[in-house]
Image (spheres, helix red, strand yellow):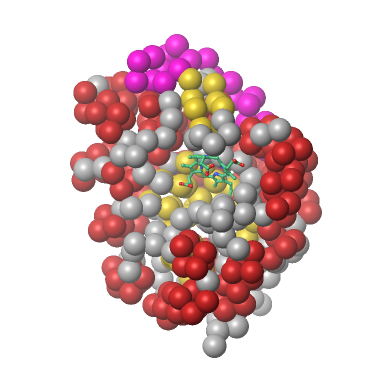
Amino acid sequence: MTHPKTLLATLMGERQPIPPVWLMRQAGRYLPEYRALRAEKGGFLALATDPDAAAEVTLQPIRRFGFDGAILFSDILMVPWALGQELSFGVGEGPRLTPPLVDHALAALERVPARLEPVYATVARVAASLPPQTTFLGFAGSPWTVATYMVAGQGSRDQGETRRYAYADPGAFGAVIAAITAMTIDYLAGQIAAGVEAVQLFDSWSGSLSPAQFEAYVIAPNAAIVAALRTRCPGVPVIGFPKGAGGKLPAYARETGVDAVGLDETVDPVWAHRALPDGMPVQGNLDPLALIAGGPALTSAIDRILAALAERPHVFNLGHGIDQHTPIAHVEALLARVRNPG
Ligand code: CP3
């Protein structure tokens, strides 16, 4: 019998005649119903820590579009918050973490794992109300990407401060990576216990690392997370998304043990199909700007990806998060094209 959840089945290695679809950041500012609820709650963190509201935001894109996957509404910076940094999201600026570890010791932070409890409560609420064909995805940031925010206290263009810190004091930086890795394992196991069916590791900044640092700070900690989850939560697929990894993708796929890999929009899916292990599920990789453009540019971009990945398990997605200026009608057009190709 075919699995009713086509996304979960694909992540387990079963190719589908029509690839399942979800979009990174599908719950978010391009949706008027999201903007309304966020305004009512007074901000992102208030929304993310209110289980009823966060469950509602998780379900909004499912109700509107019928995506095959629902991704938990939360943020990768919940782990630094649970490790004891203060977290804020100012209007019109990126997230802030204080104190930044570039000049404060990790050991001085007091862990607050209870800060993750509302996330587990959100998961339980969503799990109880998802349609039976929808796969529920949890997530966390990968240790390197999370570390770039913890060290600098904010986002940056090239993660220079964190890369310098890692070269200057590999002992201290290794301890930061180890702390994030341990908390992330507990966090993902907690999400799974509460009801998510697969998890994704977002490594948004893996593209800025030298080969040796990629090995130490991307491959090794992700392999540790996957190995721990295999023991604690057997059978739950892990998607790795090392954005910007480029030519390092095949090594990442082989050495981390992830079940599936996400491709960013710069990766040629024809190359990825040749270079990645046979049968490994692949996710991606429409350029979010093609989705904003719409029309024939969108249709041909979708068709190229579908053709390139037709011979392996494929989850259709963007190459990174959906932009807040994306027209709703273009998301509808994307779904129509993937589900009913011309
Ligand atoms: O995919 C989803 O819909 C699930 C929710 C989700 C959010 N953030 C919600 C969010 C996920 C998976 C993330 C991941 C995330 N968060 C990453 C990795 C993926 C990526 O986009 O690169 C990173 C680096 C972050 C850190 C972060 N959170 C930044 C840099 C920002 C500010 C930039 C921005 O887009 O506003 C956030 C805030 C954030 N996280 C928003 C959402 C919907 C916007 C908050 C708002 O203003 O409403």
Which residue is painted at 42% across and 53% down in the image? 241
For image coordinates 40% across by 39% down, the residue present is 145
Instruction: Indicate the position of residue 137 as horizontal and vertical percent values.
Output: 60, 53
Image position, residue 127 (x, y; %): 73, 51
* 302 vs 117, nearest the viewer: 302
Task: Give the residue at the far bottom of this rendering.
Answer: 342
**Splitting the image into 4 quarters, where does residue 170 fall?**
top left
Q: Is residue 198 visible?
A: no
**Nearest the eye: 321 or 263:** 321
**Quadrant of the image for the C terminus?**
bottom right
Q: Is any atom of residue 148 visible in this view?
A: yes
207 shown above or below 173: below
Please tell me in which quadrant of the rendered image residue 181 appears.
top left
| In the displayed structure image, the side of residue 92 where residue 34 appears, left or right | right
The vertical placement of 112 against 280, above or below, is: above
From the image, which quarter does the N terminus lie in?
Answer: bottom right
Q: Is residue 207 magenta?
A: no
Q: How many marks?
A: 0
Residue name at image x 33 percent, y 69 percent: 268
> In this image, 315 relative to 177: left or right?
right
Ligand 1 shows up in the quarter that is top right
Q: Which residues are magenta?
A: 99-120
Above or below, comparing residue 10 to residue 42 in the picture: below
Task: Say whether residue 122 is left or right of residue 74.
Answer: right
Residue at 31%, 25% in the rendered image: 173
Q: Position of residue 265 (x, y in %)?
A: 39, 62
